[in-house]
Amino acid sequence: MFVRNAAGTGWLNAASAAGFKIRNAANTGWIDRTGSLSGVLVRNAANTGWLSFGGGSPTYSVSPSAGSVAEGGAVTFTVSAPSMGSGTLYWTNAGSTVGADFSDGQNSGSVAISGGAGSISRTLVSDGVTEGAETIVLQLRTGSTGGTIVATASAVNVTDTGTPVPTQLSLAQNGLDFLYLPTGSSSDPAIYNDLIATVDTSNFYSSVPDPYAHVVFALDCSGGQGSNNPHSAPIIRNGANLWAVGRGFIILADGSIKAEQWNGTFSPAFLDITNTSGTTFNPASNPVFTVRIKAGYRTGLWANTMTIEVRAGAGIYGPLLFSGTAPGWGWDWSGSHKVSMAIIGGFVAPTGPSEDLSPRPGSGATLPFSGLDLRLF
């Protein structure tokens, strides 16, 4: 070990300096170089931490304050790094939770160490959606969030407080059903929506006598029904009111697709979409298919455009059945992104203060779905 000389002009070799001593941590005496150096700390060359002599390898630990936490709650992780003294460590989450599950939107970060200890607090959001089993597993790292893992905390189980998400839509109530995804948000007006869902129409189109029965994918939903907007009464499904304003696509039984713009009246805007895929789309032949919609705002990659692709089977890489564009169908960006999927067949509009939920012809029709997801790019 080398120590700078008093003049600051060179180094002393502790191995050959007769009587060389190091002051102990309590500053109550001296540790002789020929004695035990256990517990003696020396700052490293990078000045980012401490070197421990005679005490073995540096030790680290990270422990959660609880083994489980409910959505909306918080858990604190206690960090111990006694051989480090003070400095900075880093953490990542190897559990199944993602950044969007936390109030700060982060899934990695740093922690300040002082006196060999520090703490990390993670607060979960309550998104109202049942997502199944989730965990938080914090990993402690040195150097950066991509650095060496030096300790891993025990798993913290996240208790889901959401309402179970339906796995199918049904026409049992007045020939209409719909649901919303949790509302997304963005800070970039050049962003675009990327909506994906796989549907099984085997028991939908063929079960509804209404020739205009259709599957709906709506974006940028806002407002609600009631007060003649355009319906006289609220239309409630899955705990929410049907939107009044929005844009999207509707898919009919013969495979034709229209763009629709809802404007709070009984005269929404429609546009027939031309299939440019070079193939024929017929739900009777391909009842299970995956829909992918990209829709931009006034600027950016998909400015003033909505596109739709339909692919056979479950997945966005299946054989292409339909591809089309609604040019000029942009939208004013608001930073809020609410989307819905719906089915309609035999719906009777309310004429009074409440909706008549009586079954209509084809009330046994259902539409199972999976993978319903909105991504923002």
Image (cartoon, rainbow, N blue to C red):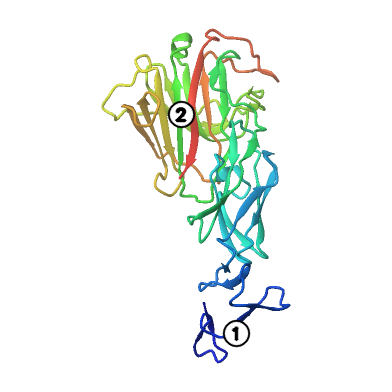
As drawn, 2 above or below 370: below
Q: Residue at horizontal 49%, vertical 88%?
A: 10
Q: Looking at the figure, which quarter contains the C terminus?
A: top left
Is residue 209 visible in this depiction of the protein? no
For marks 2 and 1, give the one nearer the viewer.
Answer: 1
Going by the numbered disc 2, the residue's amino acid type is Ala
Task: Give the SS element for disc 2.
Answer: strand
**Label 2 to label 1: alpha-carbon separation:** 77 Å
Q: Mark 2: few, some, or many residues within 10 Å (few <14, many ≥20)?
A: many
* Residue 210 placement, left or right of 50: left
**Residue sitting farthest toward the left:** 278
Q: Residue at horizontal 51%, vertical 55%?
A: 145
Which corner quadrant of the image does residue 282 belong to?
top left
Across and down, in percent, residue 114 comes to 66, 65
Location of mark 2 (residue): 197
Q: Residue at horizontal 60%, vertical 47%?
A: 153
Is residue 365 visible in this depiction of the protein? yes
**How many labels sit on residues?**
2
Across and down, in percent, residue 73 comes to 70, 42
Location of mark 1 (residue): 19
Relative depth, front residue between 366 and 315: 315
Going by the numbered disc 1, the residue's amino acid type is Gly
Q: Residue at horizontal 67%, vertical 38%?
A: 68
Relative depth, front residue between 197 and 75: 75
Which corner quadrant of the image does residue 310 belong to?
top left
